[in-house]
């Protein structure tokens, strides 16, 4: 077989006997030769696979460690990547701040370890893979009457990480990713996105006191002030003006980078604004400036230098309490939102980058199996964080690399004293960032094409929101999906197929018990129907049975 791209040459150039005759006066068949291109590495690999099928079986290409250039190369402008870097801070800062104020979490240690996680995941996946707090563990540690201690929080994180690592290493997570129906995954994403938006609206409208571990919904935020409602609404309008609905970059990409002509000038200008003005970064920088304006005395409380990193001592009681109270509710949420939903959202947003459920699950496990022993906050990969970073311009691993560099600088320079600055950060601005992250995550579920798929998705989301449990919504969604599939089965066709199988089984049993010779019928069948003899046709009632067999 001549490969594609090979140049065919005429026979007279390679065969001197072209158009000649042999001794028997028969024409000599011309020989067509092909000038093959030089072999490539892909051709060599394919040849090796054909030559040694046992050593090189057919299958997906072997995983190779990504290079720095492929993972951190800018897909858009550097300003867009910087804007995407802070796109997930709407969930990161409130949870970290609450754990630091309520439970005594060392912020400096958490900043250093999460900075390493950001750089490592950016290199590994090549997409703005977020590093988010484990929300169920944080909720239990903060909101329950008896707060969890730091050893108990770390025990919960290590327990959850161990299970996720085993699920990923054994391949069970990949199996679950293939078997879980898409409408159920979309329902989990929709519920998580709507939950983020509801929380964001509370952050914008009402005052929040994270130090008391309670979010209020009665103390309305004043209109004026450095953390007033007018400031939050202005930031919200600014982000909408710059980024629109989030499709400006996609619309500009459809132009193929062509110069702006008059019919498309408005679209090109919008795309330029979304790439060159990092809306989320400007909102975050504004919040940092307002921290010092709200309380100038925080400068006196700053201490330079990193926190002292030490190993956390975990007792057997801490293991038991952390696993039962925090790890048990966190495990299903991590499987669904931190692995399954993240992989599906990554495939939707970055189809050219292969992010597998196995790699994401093992990544979550390794991060916590290392960092939790030193007092770093339990973390995971969240679909909401990925949606937020994508919404504000993150398109490659460079976005989380920039975020990791910023965390590392803050952790090394200020250490745990940086919590004084974050405690004065305007919560309304965090609500603006969280609002767009939740909307982007919820909009990922808009691809349901049938009414049946939308029905399953909405039921899963409704149960998840009202029951405050993604696991409960997931179970209801799977059961509903199976019921609808069972309803669509054709019972008549199943009955007909079963009767046909029973009849064939009876014929085969009759053939095995028959001891008569079928030589005469073999000749009859061959002459009558002009076809080959089938051994499973018996001589008893031969003609009628042959006709029935032929009709089948």
Image (tube, helix red, strand yellow):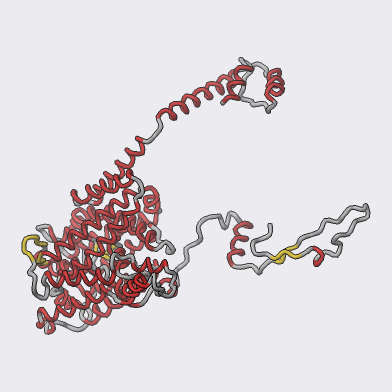
Up-down relation of residue 453 to residue 289 (above or below): above
- The one nearer the camera, 36 or 260, is 260
Residue 121 shows in the view: no
Q: Residue at x 6, y 60 (%)?
A: 218
Which of the image's four quarters has the C terminus? top right
Up-down relation of residue 300 to residue 191 (above or below): below
Q: Quadrant of residue 519?
A: top right
Which of the image's four quarters has the N terminus? bottom right
Residue 231 location (% of width, % of height): 14, 73
Residue found farthest to the left: 219
Q: Quadrant of residue 229?
A: bottom left
Q: Quadrant of residue 393?
A: bottom left
Residue found farthest to the front: 262
Residue 151 location (% of width, % of height): 19, 64
Q: Residue at x 55, y 55 (%)?
A: 58
- The one nearer the camera, 264 or 431, is 264
Residue 243 location (% of width, % of height): 29, 69
- The one nearer the camera, 529 or 406, is 529
Image check: 331 left or right of 2? left
Residue 527 shows in the view: yes
Image check: 492 left or right of 423? right
Q: Residue at x 37, y 50 (%)?
A: 176
Image check: 254 left or right of 481? right
């Amino acid at each position: 077989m001549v490969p594609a791209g090979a140049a065919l040459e005429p026979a007279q150039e390679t065969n001197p006997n072209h158009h000649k005759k042999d001794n028997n006066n028969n024409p000599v068949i011309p020989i067509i030769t092909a000038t093959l291109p030089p072999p490539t590495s892909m051709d060599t690999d394919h040849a090796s696979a054909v030559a040694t099928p046992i050593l090189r079986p057919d299958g997906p290409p072997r995983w190779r460690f990504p290079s720095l250039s492929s993972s951190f190369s800018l897909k858009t402008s550097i300003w867009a990547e910087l804007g995407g870097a802070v796109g997930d801070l709407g969930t990161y800062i409130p949870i970290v701040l609450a754990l630091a104020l309520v439970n005594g979490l060392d912020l400096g240690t958490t900043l250093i370890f999460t900075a390493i996680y950001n750089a490592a995941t950016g290199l590994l996946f090549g997409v703005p893979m977020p590093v988010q707090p484990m929300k169920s563990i944080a909720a239990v540690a903060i909101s329950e009457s008896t707060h969890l201690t730091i050893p108990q929080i770390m025990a919960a994180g290590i327990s959850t990480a161990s299970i996720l690592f085993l699920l990923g290493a054994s391949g069970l997570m990949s199996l679950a990713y293939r078997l879980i129906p898409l409408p159920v995954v979309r329902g989990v994403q929709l519920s998580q996105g709507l939950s983020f938006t509801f929380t964001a609206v509370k952050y914008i409208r009402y005052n929040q006191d994270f130090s008391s571990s309670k979010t209020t919904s009665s103390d309305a935020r004043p209109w004026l002030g450095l953390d007033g409602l007018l400031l939050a609404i202005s930031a919200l309008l600014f982000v909408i003006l710059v980024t629109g609905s989030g499709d400006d970059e996609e619309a500009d990409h459809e132009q193929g980078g062509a110069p702006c002509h008059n019919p498309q000038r408005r679209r090109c200008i919008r795309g330029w604004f979304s790439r060159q003005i990092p809306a989320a970064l400007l909102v975050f920088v504004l919040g940092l400036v307002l921290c010092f304006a709200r309380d100038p005395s925080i400068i006196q409380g700053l201490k330079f230098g990193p926190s002292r990193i030490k190993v956390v001592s975990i007792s057997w009681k801490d293991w038991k309490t952390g696993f039962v109270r925090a790890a048990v509710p966190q495990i299903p949420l991590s499987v669904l939102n931190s692995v399954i939903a993240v992989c599906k959202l990554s495939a939707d947003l970055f189809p050219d980058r292969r992010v597998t459920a196995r790699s994401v699950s093992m990544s979550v496990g390794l991060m916590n199996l290392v960092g939790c022993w030193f007092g770093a906050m339990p973390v995971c990969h969240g679909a909401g964080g990925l949606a937020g970073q994508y919404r504000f311009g993150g398109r490659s691993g460079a976005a989380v690399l920039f975020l990791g560099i910023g965390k590392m600088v803050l952790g090394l320079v200020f250490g745990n004293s940086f919590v004084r600055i974050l405690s004065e950060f305007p919560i309304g601005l965090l609500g603006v960032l969280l609002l767009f992250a939740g909307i982007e995550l919820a909009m990922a579920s808009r691809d349901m094409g049938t009414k049946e798929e939308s029905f399953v998705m909405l039921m899963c989301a409704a149960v998840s929101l009202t029951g405050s449990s993604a696991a409960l919504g997931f179970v209801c969604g799977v059961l509903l999906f199976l019921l609808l599939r069972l309803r669509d089965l054709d019972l008549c066709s199943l009955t007909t197929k079963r009767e046909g199988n029973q009849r064939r089984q009876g014929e085969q049993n009759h053939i095995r018990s028959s001891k008569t010779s079928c030589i005469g019928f073999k000749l009859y069948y061959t002459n009558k129907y002009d076809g080959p003899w089938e051994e499973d046709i018996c001589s008893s009632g031969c003609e009628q049975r042959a006709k029935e067999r032929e009709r089948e």
